[in-house]
Image: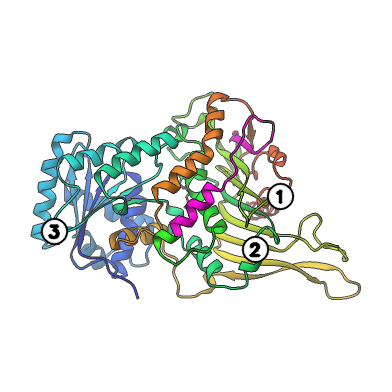
Amino acid sequence: MNKIPENQILVIFGASGDLTRRKLLPSLFELFLRKLLPKRFLIVGVARTKQNTEEYRTKLREAIIDSRKSSVVDGPAMDGFLKHIYYISMDTTTPGQYPWLARQIDQMRVASDIDDNILYYLATPPTMYALIPRFIQDAGMNRSSRGWRRIIVEKPYGRDEESARELDLVLRSVFPEKEIYRIDHFLGKETVQNILVLRFSNGIWEPLWNHHYIDRVEITAAETLGMEGRGGYYETAGALRDMVQNHLMQLMAFIAMEPPSGFDTEAIRDEIVKVFRSLRPLTPGSGAVEAVRAQYKSGTLNGKRVGAYREEPGVASDSSVETYVALKFFIDNWRWSGVPFYFYTGKRLCSKRSEIVIYFKSTPQHFFEGECEGTSCNRLTITLQPDESIRLSFGLKQPGEGFVVRQVSMDFFYNSLLRVRLPDAYERLLLDAMIGDSLLYARSDSLEASWHFLAPLLHYWEKHPQEDLVFYEPGSGGPAEVSSISDTPFFFSDSICSVEKIKEKDEN
Ligand code: BG6
């Protein structure tokens, strides 16, 4: 049974930005169509751009149609949805404007007979994350005796351990921890949530889910896109901050965590933090190769010429920022002792693919021709995108003479569940925040622990900007140097990229 949120106002700061247009409003429209929004609700967009509500609604209509997230994109439903949206033009860097904003919101609330419940969404540049909450507090907009106040904060949540802690101090002095929603959109993906169900609703995995049976775990998030106009932001981030610190760390925690004491928010968050705290510290510069960082050159991707990272707008011509990271690490606890975990993530690779591959150990002896050499062919592959699926691979006898092993798999594809639509990550996360369920949002201690784990590498790279930076071809599986930490990454190893190359040839 779907829970419907209480009636409320969603105030979006950064309302004229890309995130609001591409993700937030299309997702809210989808929730509206599925009758998951309360009867009485308003969305109030706040941004500097001078425009009135009518102009804003017209732009949103186009944005929602463009996003093509729904089969019913225009018509009476869209008109009905847009009626709930208002726009306020305001300079959000000026604290003196906030009391006026509070009055505007309150007048709208009273006129629409909505209870005094307000959810703020910070979809602004990160430099505003610590400012807006302070201004909200100064104007008394952070509490009410008649209802609740919540805040959703987008990533990046700080740029290192210290700045994340500082941001936390500010937010927690304005809102209670339980009302702070730190978003990681990967956790809104259906396939990511399914990791928990796969692990904890099936008895067959748990006996195998440990160092006795698992050889290694690979978590990959590969993208074909380059900077798409975000070069300026990316120069301050790089792949480690942009993808690893948040998305990949959270995926790893879902794979590695212990069964929680119950299926509730804090019990799950406790287990996530325990995983992060058990990570073996990274030791860059010590001689042990744990990480490979790389940047894309110019080249060809999907038959098109693409520029190098250093040629992207907003990027320095001698930038040493990494667009690719491979990382090998260990979790020093009883379950994972000695099992290497790997992260691979990069831009401008041959395919858009996010995947977790769990390799089981091989049999102690090999009898048959065709068995996998080295490690076993028993793999559990959880594909988050593009073809959301779960696949168990194993060897079987090839029909005919002799005993030759052939690799086969048992697959489950989400698209085989006809009539089931996979909601966009933002739909689930927005709805959860409106309801007051923070299970799929990150708690501050886990973010801090995640930054803490990556800190040695971040510091080392900052101190030695060009050291070990290598380059890779667009449309490849990443840099060849990745073999220094692992000789068999699944994504790099051909299969995926060669399939993409065949597709590309067929299309040309
Ligand atoms: C964002 C990163 O958090 O995630 C982007 O800032 C990245 O650089 C994106 O492209 C990937 O998300 P998804 O859902 O498209 O895999």
Callout 1: CB less than 8 Å from ligand 1: no
Between circles 1 and 2, the one closer to the viewer is: 2
Between circles 1 and 3, the one closer to the viewer is: 3
Labelled disc at residue 380: 2
Question: Residue 363: percent from the left, percent from the top?
Answer: 80, 63
Badges 1 and 3: C-beta atoms under 8 Å apart? Answer: no
Q: Residue at x 26, y 66 (%)?
A: 5
Local secondary structure at mark 1: loop
Local secondary structure at mark 2: strand
Q: Residue at x 33, y 67 (%)?
A: 72
Q: How far apart are the alpha carbons under marks 1 and 3?
A: 59 Å
Region in magenta: 268-297
Q: Residue at x 63, y 33 (%)?
A: 471
Using the image as rendered, state which of residue 141 and residue 38 is in the foreground. Answer: 141
Residue 406: in magenta span: no
Corner quadrant of residue 164: top left
Using the image as rendered, state which of residue 379 and residue 223 is in the foreground. Answer: 379
Q: How far apart are the alpha carbons under marks 2 and 3?
A: 50 Å
| 404 w.r.t. 167: above or below | below
Residue to which mark 3 is pinned: 146
Question: Residue 441: percent from the left, percent from the top?
Answer: 39, 54
Q: Neighbour class for label 1 at 10 Å: few (<14), some, many (≥20)?
A: few
Q: Neighbour class for label 2 at 10 Å: few (<14), some, many (≥20)?
A: many
Corner quadrant of residue 115: bottom left
Q: Earlier in the sequence, mark 1 or mark 2?
A: 2
Residue 248 appears in the rendering? no
Residue to which mark 1 is pinned: 493
Q: Quadrant of the N terminus?
A: bottom left
Badges 2 and 3: C-beta atoms under 8 Å apart? Answer: no
